[in-house]
Image (tube, grey):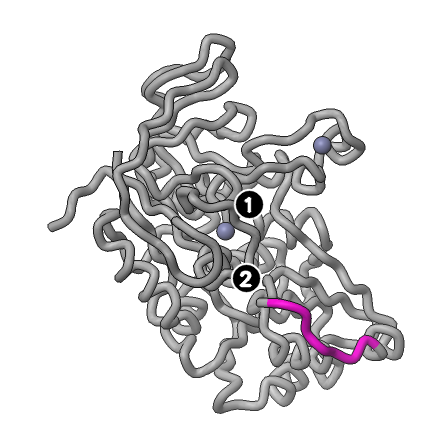
Amino acid sequence: MKAVVKTGPGEGQLELKDWPEPSPAPDEVKIKIAAAGICGTDIHIIKGRWRCDPPVVLGHEFCGTVVELGSRVRGFGPGDRVVASNPARVCGVCYHCRAGNPFMCSKRVSAGYMIDGAFAEYLCIRPEVCHHLPDRVSFRQAALGEPLAVAVHAVIERTTVHAGDWVLVSGPGCVGLLTMQIAKLEGAGVIVAGIEKDQSRLECARTLGADVVVNTSKESLLDIVRRCTNGLGADLVYECAGVAVSLELCWEAVRKEGTVVQVGVYPGPIQTDLNKVMMKELKLVGTYGYIWTSWRRAVQLLSNGKVNTESMVSNEYPLTQFEEAFRKTQDGSAIKVVLCPQRSAP
Ligand SMILES: [Zn+2]
Ligand SMILES: [Zn+2]
């Protein structure tokens, strides 16, 4: 089969290769991949800034159709449409696995950078991380299931947003736009901030229901946040950019006794003034991945149409055009780029 493979460590080294088609272990299902999203983490991986065990097929956000079952699999059948998540493997017996948060398992193995992922025609994974898709949810919509689960975990499970709150989302990438939509559903007023190169993403934020969008390259975010909140500042701030300047703005924009949530991934260690956390009596919350209940809600939100992922997919490419797909993801002109491994090049 064809697969987009990171062939060596460090920067670049990404190739479309003929790769062995996997067959399912007794406890795995084999999925024919319909759509797989390119994520900010994939960019960190190809820049050599994120753990990766090459040679490995990239791609950790995906959906498709079950085509084969391992002998011990129950509850799934050939033809089932599924969206799947990580972690691909966990120990199952540590404190975090037993407590229901497998992302914290120190034996966690993730598909798409530690073992083969979904930028390929097929992938085998354990059924525990597969979620059935209702017929009314298209693969195009479900391609964003994984980042949606991340946003659900951040907004609903790691923090509490109340009706009437003001929320700032800094960074209008895929997770930022989904974080905005969920904060809106929870009843908050939402300000979405980005920079000049995010212009199309900021426009998307507006069409998806953001109350205020701010281009911080042109406008003062602080002035706008103060105007919205009668000078108080935002109740909650979600840092979704993974950029130090964005975090600095978050410290300023959050109100005293407010909450700052770290959603984005920084390229490496950053310098910042943590006296802000002390002097403003802030709560600083980390959020990483999702738990099973995040997916239950994510699939429900796709199914009832409360969250719009459809219009966030700006570009779809066959595997043969992976270079163009990665370029589009990096230059900021795309909202979400999705690879469709069953499609052949035009
Ligand atoms: Zn991702
Ligand atoms: Zn564990």
Q: Splitting the image into 4 quarters, where does residue 244 fall? A: bottom right
Q: Is residue 73 or residue 10 the one in the foreground? A: 10
The magenta stretch spans residue 269: yes
Q: Residue at x 59, y 63 (%)?
A: 264
Q: Is residue 323 left or right of residue 198?
A: left
Q: Main secondary structure of the magenta part?
A: loop
Q: Is residue 122 or residue 255 the one in the foreground? A: 122
Reading the image, the residue beneath label 1 is: 149
Q: Residue at x 69, y 47 (%)?
A: 157
Reading the image, the residue beneath label 2 is: 49
10 Å crowding of disc 2: few (<14), some (14-19), many (20+): some
Query: Any atom of ligand 1 within 8 Å of the CB at mark 2?
Result: no
Location of residue 336 with respect to 75 vertically, above or below? below
10 Å crowding of disc 1: few (<14), some (14-19), many (20+): many
Work out which quarter of the rendered image holds the N terminus and state it: top left
Q: Splitting the image into 4 quarters, where does residue 202 fall? A: bottom left
Q: Is residue 335 or residue 21 the one in the foreground? A: 21
Residue type at tag 1? Ala
Residue 62 - label? none
Location of residue 123 with respect to 35 vertically, above or below? above
Location of residue 204 with respect to 50 vertically, above or below? below
Magenta stretch bounds: 268-274
Q: Is residue 73 or residue 94 the one in the foreground? A: 94
Given the current orientation, which residue lies at the most extreme left position?
346
